[in-house]
Image: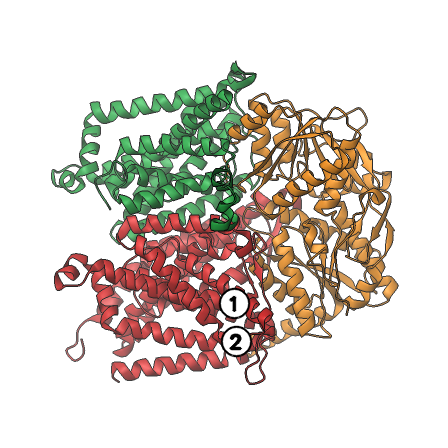
Chain colours: A green, B orange, C red
Amino acid sequence: MLEIITFSTLNGVLYGMLLFMMASGLTLIFSMMGVLNFAHASFYMIGAYFGFEISRRIGFWPGFVVAPLLVGGVGALIERFGLRRVHGYGHVAELLFTFGLAFVIEELVNMFWGRLPVDYRVPPSLDFVAFKLFDTTYPAYRMFMLATAVAMFVFLILILKRTRVGLIIQAALTHPNMVAMLGHDVPTVFMLVFGVGAALAGLAGVIAGPALVTQPSMAGLLGPILFVVIVVGGLGSLTGAFLASLLIGLVQTFAVAINGSLFDLIGPTATTIFGELGSVTVAQIAPILPYLLLVVVLIVRPTGLFGNRET
Amino acid sequence: MRNLTLGVCVAALLTAGAARAEDTVKLGYIDPLSGGGASIGEVGLKHFQWLADQINASGGLMGKKLEILPFDDKVNPQEAVVQARKAIDAGARFITQGNGSSVASALIDFVQKFNDRNPGKETLYFNYAAVDTSLTNAKCSFWHFRWDANSTIKMAAITNYLKTQPSVKKVYIINQDYSFGQEVKKLANEMLKAKRPDVQIVGDELHPLLKVTDFAPYIAKIKASGADTVITGNWGQDMALLLKAAADAGLQVKWYTYYAGGAGGPTAIKQTGLDHKVFDVVEGNPNSAPPDAQKTEEEFRAKFNVTLWYPRAVNEMRMFQKAVTEAKSLDPKAVALKLEDMKVKTFDGGEGWMRKEDHQFHQDMYIRSFGALPKGAKFDEEKTGWGWTEVAKVAAKDTVVPTTCKMERP
Amino acid sequence: MTGASRTLLAFAAFAVILAIAPMVFASGTSVTMMSVMGVMIIFALSYNMLLGETGLLSFGHAVYYGLAGFFAAHAMNLARQQGLPVPLPVIPLVGGVAGLFFGVLFGAVSTRRAGTVFAMITLGLGELVSAFALLMRTFFGGEDGISTNRAKLLPVFGYKFGPQIQIYYLIAIWCFVCVALMYAITRTPLGRMCNAVRDNPERAEFVGYSAQRVRFIAFSLSATFAGVAGALSAINFELMNSHAAGAGQSGAVLLMTYVGGVGQFIGPIIGAVLITFLQTSLSDVTKAWMLYFGLLFIGVVLFAPGGISGWLALHAPLVRGGRIFRLAPAYALAALPFAALFVGMVLLIELSYHMLVDAASEGTKTSVFHIAMDGASAPPWIATVVLLVGGVLGLRAVWPKIGDAWAAATEPTGGEA
């Protein structure tokens, strides 16, 4: 039991940090531009594929550095030549633009790399066992992922708290109109934020690709969960996004470890009241728990746990 | 003037189309050709087009050429029904499909109703890969024939093999939470209890279908249970991610699977380095097949750059041709009657037999393990350098299980 | 001609089209496809009651369509087993009631807010329902879904509804009725209040209407019509499975509605017909059809935010003023570079698709538009680049001309405005 708790905590935190790498960019983009970017998880996927392509040609480490930059560039270009054009048509059009974009990106990835998972390997320099606890090994690569995520988190905090751009972004989180009125070049800041957000998602993809599976459906799997994270955390709140990421990471990991069902909890009455649902185990419904959380949080507190804006 | 020329051209095209329609026998191939399942559907299509070429080279069906008409069902049952309708409109009296038991079940239902409502226009459905046992039990139909071994037969083969493996003591069962996974779970429990009552089932898990991104928590549970063997029906990413997480956590067990050989499976196993620890159950193994089958396999690989995944498709098409020849007719009902109880030599050697009661094909099954190839073995998979080695053969007669099918015969 | 008589004429034309369509397109495939189109017209229009009329963006509209479909399928099976005297044509009412029930249930929690919060709640509800559909196997039938037999119900005037053509007319009648009803709703005070809530909820509140209540009513009505569509779909396919309530279906109805245009009542009808046609037919023509779908969607968002009907509506005053012909020369001029651009795009996609996906197993030779070409040789690629560059440059050159023509055509001449 202790073994399961230890490893579930580790894996849950890791998954949560991975979510946060994407959610941070997504929530920044949303707060500043009002766009819920459906294609955000697609940047994560492109990151993984760029990382794979570079790693098989040059090596993992060049890919680790270059791929996120490339993804950031792609993101900035999409903002400059696509999203900005749609901006005038309102938020719904922007949202639908990213919705279509996610679709096209998935198809392009299908075309270039095929529909089957690609062979994106953990670099040999990290392919060893980090530690062994209760007879279960924990790979060094996962520790590396965790370290990268934490480093990125610290880096993001420093930028936001210590730089001028960070100040503008922070101001724009709560008072986007006022920032524009103060005469800042808002379109460029938008492009920058969109590019950086994409690059962060790309970085998450580069490091998650070898540990999970790099395949065209990886964006579709994560996309909706990201929305859950930023909405539950509170739109526009980085702290909220961070805590919600960890919460969802841990909830999903721990739910898997629980075998119990309503039937086990309250006995046969469960099946009389809930029918088949009475015998469904917590582990079975692990992936839908985030959505349940989403709906409940929004009903009870439409601003999310830490947010103060609704739209 | 221009309009007239155009009209003539269109008319010419139409008549040409009509003339061609008379000439060929059409087999509608209904499977995913876009989206996530396309990589599998495309390979299946190549099998059938290639097999049609062979039939045509050997004189065709009653002197007519066989033509494969591809239709994209997007692995969606409702879409499959629309596409089947299109196939019939295009002149196909025979359709074949394999991916997705839910699609297969919708097609059986559709074909049955269509044949009831359109006497004289009957259509026959050949199933080459949908394995849900109920398709030849409760849902069985006279108009449906299945060449793939169903879930029950496959589990019977696995458990027959496990009977001979005393080292197996603690088994963990993990499956995807949908009809197929639930069936595998049920069969594994029943058959293990019957054939190996001494084996302890230390875990029995259902996880959500294609939604899990990290299997580490499941692996932690398997590890904690002390299992030495895992039985799973997982396929696709659920197979690959499961094995990956197992290798990461250093879990040393044997994996008995249905679909480790599916697309992407060999690549994933090679990545994890689980050498001869992953097993699957199939109707043919290229490395131990008879020489003529090996020759065919070589030709197929040279031409299409992929493994001949579906020996059962070869059996299907050869038996189709045989039935047409014996019936001296292209009428689906006459063909169906000849297919019943037909006995043939299967592609990978051994006797095969199409059971009349439920239209389920019975054939020798092979348990194989994936890993480094012994000397002399010719075929690796997905360019990994590793390949399948036969570890046991389960004779067709040992996989026969009774059916509950009550067929309405026309 | 007055507005009212024009509306009557439009509905009469709609009825005639519905009636004679299967005589013009008589093959089994087209009748099946047109049946699906009829269902989708209702579904897309019901969606536009939210998106277009009330300004509510939903990512889970298929929930009501799918759930109602299941209720309809169960109702049909029940009627058959119990021998109840229920004829098939009333089954869509079951769907409507089921849609209404779930609309009221989920609407009560989701319509308290508009905008992003509403969109996210619908997304969450959609995911929850499709996940529960797989857990509750007796009601939803797992992966296989619930199958039924429409021909085993009480016959009406000797019709047993086995043949597809009878189903087509059943759907057509229901489609006509629902379209008329939904049109009528847009003309009622409620319809106007929906628009007010969409455009300026604060003002609507000041006038004395509760924006929340208006949203709730619109949502429930929309779910009711979606339910009718779901029941008709169950009748049409004789099969309902969890796909129908899933995210894919919700995305499809959004696509239909938006591509058709949310600003005009006819928009979703155009979208439903076009997208259904493309969904069933495009996959026969090209393997890259999903890519075309995505590009079509992005293209509409970028260049025609009002959708197809919005673009057409721009021309309506010109047609009425009889001045549409002044645009003809400029449009004819633009047609050529536009066609070049289109052909160039198709060539690019098809060639790339072939070289990247199929070349490994089928060789580099392919054919696009029935023209044989070798993807490994230069000429097809050169042609692609020439067409693309030529198309873009050409369009840039003629664009000002179109602007001039528009200005000339719309220039007020005094009489009509």
Q: Quadrant of the C terminus of chain C?
A: bottom left
Mark 2 is on which residue type? Val
Q: Is residue C412 visible?
A: yes
Q: Nearer the viewer, residue A35 or A64?
A: A35
Position above or below: C259 against B6 = above
Q: Mark 2 sits on what residue?
A: C86
Q: Quadrant of the N terminus of chain C?
A: bottom left
Position above or below: B390 against A123 = below
Mark 1 is on which residue type? Ala
- Toward which corner of the image does residue B146 lie, by quadrant? bottom right
Residue B279 in the figure: left or right of residue C248:
right
Q: CA distance from mark 2 to mark 1?
A: 9 Å
Q: Mark 1 sits on what residue?
A: C75
Give the chain of mark 2: C
Q: Circle 2 — which element? A: loop
The x and y percentages for residue C243 are 51, 54
The x and y percentages for residue C323 are 27, 76
Q: Which residue shows up at 78% across the image and 33% down it?
A: B161
Position above or below: A243 against B124 = above
Q: Residues within 10 Å of mark 2 (few under 14, many from 20)?
A: some
Position above or below: C343 against A26 = below
Answer with mark 2 or mark 1, whichever residue precedes in sequence: 1
Q: Is residue C44 visible?
A: no
Q: Nearer the viewer, residue B291 or C242?
A: C242
